[in-house]
Each structure stands twice: as C-alpha cells, then as structure tokens.
Image: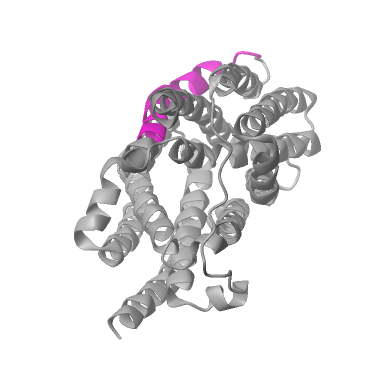
C-alpha cells in the first residue's frame, strides 16, 4: 500500500510545494515595497512581512494538531484556501490603499506557509523507510523549479492591474494557490501512526537544558531570523538604489535557488563530516554574505550576498533540524518539533519586523552588521554542544 502511493504522492507534494513557493516568492518581492507604499509611518513598511511570519508561527502547532484529526489532505487544502483568500484580499487592500487590510491579508498568508511546512513531513510519512532521503529532496526539488519561474511570474504580474502597482502580483498569487488545490486534492496519505516507545516523555524543561537542544534550536532560529532579516530588506534596498524590478527578481531568484539546491547534498555532507563542521561552515557563509553586502551596493554585491545567504540558511537549517533529532525520544517528537518550529518562526518574525526599521533608520549596512551578535551566540552554543559530546 505504501510503495505505489509513494512516487505519486512525492510528485504531487513537489508540485504543491513548487506552486506554494511561486506565491511565496511573489510575496517576498512585493510585501515590503507595498508596505512602504501603503504605510504612513515608514519604519512600519515591513510589518506585513512580520505579520505573515507571525501568522505562520501561530498556525504551525494548531495546524499540526488539526491534521492529526482530519488528515493531511484536508489540512493542506485549508492552507491553500487561506493562500487564495490572502492574495485576493491583498490585491483588494492595495487597490483601496488600505495598510490595515493589507496587513490582515499577509497574516492569513501565514496559514498557507505553515501548512506548506508539513509537505516534507507528509512526503516522509508516505515513503518506505529506505526512501526517506529521496522523499525530502523530491519535495525540495519543487522549490528549485519554482525558484526558476516564480520571480519571472511575479515581475510580469506586477502591473497587471495598473495604474495600481503590485496588486496584480497578489491576484496572480491567489490564482496560483487555487491551482495548487488540484495536486493537494489528489494526494492519498495514510493517517500518521502514533510512534510510542517504552520510555516516557520527559518534561520540556529537562529536554530544553540539553546542549543538543539549545544548539539545534539556536541554529535553526538564527538561520531563519537572519535570512529573513536580509531578504526582506533586499527588494526595498535595491529599489532605493535605483535598480529595476527585473534586477531584484534575478537576485531573489538566485537566493531562492541557493536556499533549496544545497538540500540535495547537505545530508550527505552531514553524514560524511558530521553536523558540527556543517554548522560552522554555514555561520562562516553568513559572515561572507554580510561582507559581500557591506563591500558595496552594486548588482554583483546584492547577487553574491543573497546567494551566500541562501546556502548559509540551508546549512544551518538542515543542520539544526538534524541535530534536533538527537534531543528527543520518539514519545517527545510532536512536542519538541512544535516548540522548535514556533521558536524558529518567532525568530523569523523578529527578523522581518526589525528589517524595515533598521533599513529606514540606519540603512542597508546596519541590516548586515545586525547579524554579528546572533552569529556569535549561535557559534558559542554549537561549540558548547561539540565540547559536551567529547566530554
């Protein structure tokens, strides 16, 4: 029963992931700029981006619990419906010039993003044991394909409803979310079986005191927080430097590709060299991304910085997720994963919210310098974990 659904489900989930990301990339490119256009107080420009992340953080745990009751497919369809509603509301809000309505739209988009986080788990659930690695990379392949077309679609749709800028992009993103309902409606996933083991579950505080837990959560949270911080500011900074929307599209395209392409070999690198060297490499890449951004504001600087940022995110996020599995017993899985996802998206929300303020008050360089203390903290936690393992 498992086997013959697997290939089909993996394909459908990869398609759904790709379609979600086309909507997602459109939001990344236009949310900050539309926010800047609609907000009376300029440092609130990235509040819509932050609210989308807040929506995601708030919805991850409830959606997980809901899907346990009504099944993955129904949960995923609810997510896509939220995405379609959000895009339509976003386009309407921009045409009405309403910042408040636009914020409501991006908050609802968070539900879609939260559900899409579970595509990779769903692919694993319907995969035979020996195919798990392939299942995850297949779903991520959807991300690679959409990175190639997403920015092109976004740029093309920007002036669809002109003279109102950006509204067309949100409308197209709503249509794409409706299209995503087709593959989602076709998936057949067995209800997730509860994994039980002889060992009982420990209290969360006991789990949270382990070096492995602290290092895992900090790496994943830093990867998201810093990546979103810089990525949110990029379209606004580039337009501020006089670059065309096409240029911004190419930079975001390079960034999204750099986020997903490494997933095909990150797992192999972790197996070969261990998780700690991969995490340290990711931190070094974040540092190099900041250096490239601080070196100047030419097209090449933005491109190199965002490609490095994408790979750095991948190493820290995949590494952190791998490390997290060392911190919990089977009976604790749901609880610990839920806490982890919540902290990660809370970090992402703080990153996207501070992004607009930093950019508006202190400029692009400040956004990049802001990464330093967080990298130092993550480095310390990872070194502590590495020492505790040798002890």
- Relative to residue 276, is residue 151 drawn left or right? right
- Relative to residue 122, is residue 290 drawn left or right? left
Identify whether 222 is placed above or below 211: above
In the rendered image, residue 55, in percent from the top left (x then y), is placed at: 69, 45
In the rendered image, residue 232, in percent from the top left (x then y), is placed at: 53, 45
In the rendered image, residue 361, in percent from the top left (x then y), is placed at: 60, 57
Front residue of this view, candidates 76 and 83: 76
Main SS category, magenta section = helix
Please tell me in which quadrant of the rendered image residue 358 appears. bottom right
Range of magenta residues: 138-161
Which colour scheme appears in the figure? one colour
The verdict on residue 302 being magenta is no
Is residue 204 visible in this depiction of the protein? yes
Identify the residue at horizontal 23%, vertical 53% (top origin). Answer: 269
Identify the residue at horizontal 60%, vertical 34% (top origin). Answer: 72
Look at the image and tell me in which quarter the C terminus lies.
bottom left
């Amino acid at each position: 029963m498992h086997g013959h659904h697997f290939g089909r489900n993996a394909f459908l989930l990869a398609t759904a992931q790709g379609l979600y990301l086309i909507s997602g990339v459109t939001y990344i490119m236009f949310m900050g700029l539309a926010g800047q256009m609609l907000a009376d107080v300029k440092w609130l420009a990235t509040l819509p981006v932050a609210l989308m992340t807040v929506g995601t953080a708030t919805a991850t745990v409830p959606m997980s619990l809901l899907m346990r009751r009504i099944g993955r497919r129904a949960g995923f369809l609810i997510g896509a419906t939220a995405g379609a509603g959000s895009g339509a509301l976003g386009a309407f809000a921009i045409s009405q010039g309403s910042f408040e309505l636009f914020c409501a739209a991006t908050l609802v988009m968070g539900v879609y993003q939260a559900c899409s986080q579970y595509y990779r788990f769903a692919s694993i659930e319907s995969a035979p044991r020996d195919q798990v690695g392939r299942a995850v990379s297949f779903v991520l392949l959807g991300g690679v394909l959409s990175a190639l077309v997403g920015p092109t679609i976004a740029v093309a749709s920007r002036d669809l409803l002109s003279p109102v800028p950006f509204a067309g992009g949100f409308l197209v993103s709503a249509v794409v979310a409706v299209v995503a309902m087709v593959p989602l409606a076709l998936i057949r996933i067995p209800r997730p079986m509860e994994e039980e083991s002889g060992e009982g579950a420990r209290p969360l505080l006991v789990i949270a005191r382990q070096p492995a837990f602290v290092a895992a959560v900090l790496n994943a949270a830093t990867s998201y927080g810093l990546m979103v911080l810089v990525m949110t500011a990029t379209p606004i900074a580039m337009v501020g430097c006089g670059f065309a929307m096409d240029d911004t599209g190419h930079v975001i395209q390079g960034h999204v590709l750099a986020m997903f392409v490494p997933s095909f070999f990150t797992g192999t690198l972790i197996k070969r060299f261990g998780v700690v060297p991969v995490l340290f490499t990711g931190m070094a890449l974040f540092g190099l991304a900041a250096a490239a951004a601080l070196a100047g504001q030419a097209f090449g600087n933005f491109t190199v910085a965002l490609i490095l940022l994408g790979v750095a995110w991948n190493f820290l996020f995949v590494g952190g997720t791998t490390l997290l599995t060392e911190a919990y017993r089977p009976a604790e899985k749901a609880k610990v994963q839920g806490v982890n996802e919540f902290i990660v998206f809370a970090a992402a929300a703080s990153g996207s919210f501070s992004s607009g303020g930093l950019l508006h008050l202190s400029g692009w360089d400040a956004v990049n310098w802001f990464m330093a203390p967080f990298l130092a903290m993550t480095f310390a936690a990872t070194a502590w974990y590495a020492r505790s393992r040798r002890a």
